[in-house]
Amino acid sequence: MKSETFIKEKNSFIIAIAAVSGGGKTEITKALVNQLPHAVALHFDGFALAGPSSIIQWIEKGADPHAWDITPIVEAVQRFKQNYAYIILDFPFSYLHQALASEIDLSFFIDTPLDIALARRIVRDFELLEDIHDDLRFYLEKGRGAYIHMLETARMDADKIIDGTLSKEETMQQIIEEVNRRIKDGSDSDR
């Protein structure tokens, strides 16, 4: 399903895709770029960003998104706004980081059950059994808090929550239908 023709004053429709680690942000972002005309993706993990030295301490202190200097992402958005119809942000904070909040037209949170997200991370990131055990211990002792925090913040801040157990095709269909509806209605996010 291709998106409808895009016409908008600011030239780009900016979509944020948020989820916990292993929740499907990157896969869906890449698929959207291939599905939407004149689209480009910006991946949070693809930038060298200044941020907290310890994710666990950052979470324990309240996980303020503004502890991350996302200036390189903001600059990339500004560069691409005039040349692309769609900018897809693989971005964990939804509207929570004020440096990008006013640029985002529509934010989705892929609500992937934590067991599925954890299993995807292990399959994606680890090969050695010892490393898997270490990661699972870390997750149980401290890391799960980061996942729960995402569910309590970015999930609640998104415009639309997508069931993370859906297939990639079903997820894409829901996202594209909502984007088309917003463009047709002229009802960008009011943030």
Image (cartoon, rainbow, N blue to C red):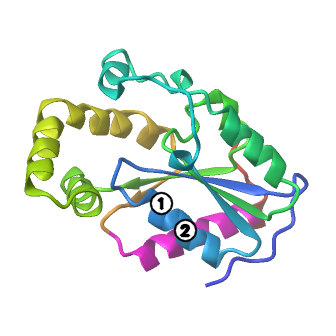
User: Few, some or many C-alpha atoms within 10 Å of disc 1 (few <14, some 14-19, many ≥20)?
Assistant: many
Vertical position of residue 111 compared to residue 181: above or below? above
Q: Position of residue 10 (x, y in %)?
A: 87, 52
Q: Is residue 5 magenta?
A: no
Q: Secondary structure at mark 1?
A: helix
Q: Position of residue 15 (x, y in %)?
A: 64, 55
- Which quarter of the image is occupied by the N terminus? bottom right
Give the residue at the far bottom of this rendering: 1
Q: Is residue 175 magenta?
A: yes
Vertical position of residue 22 compared to residue 97: above or below? below
The foreground one among 43 and 163 is 43
Query: Do the residues under discs 1 and 2 have CB atoms within 8 angstroms?
Result: yes
Badge 2 is on which residue? 30
The foreground one among 48 and 146 is 48
In the image: residue 164, left or right of residue 109: left
Secondary structure, magenta segment, majority class: helix
Magenta region, residue range? 166-183
Instruction: Report the amino acid beneath label 2.
Output: Lys
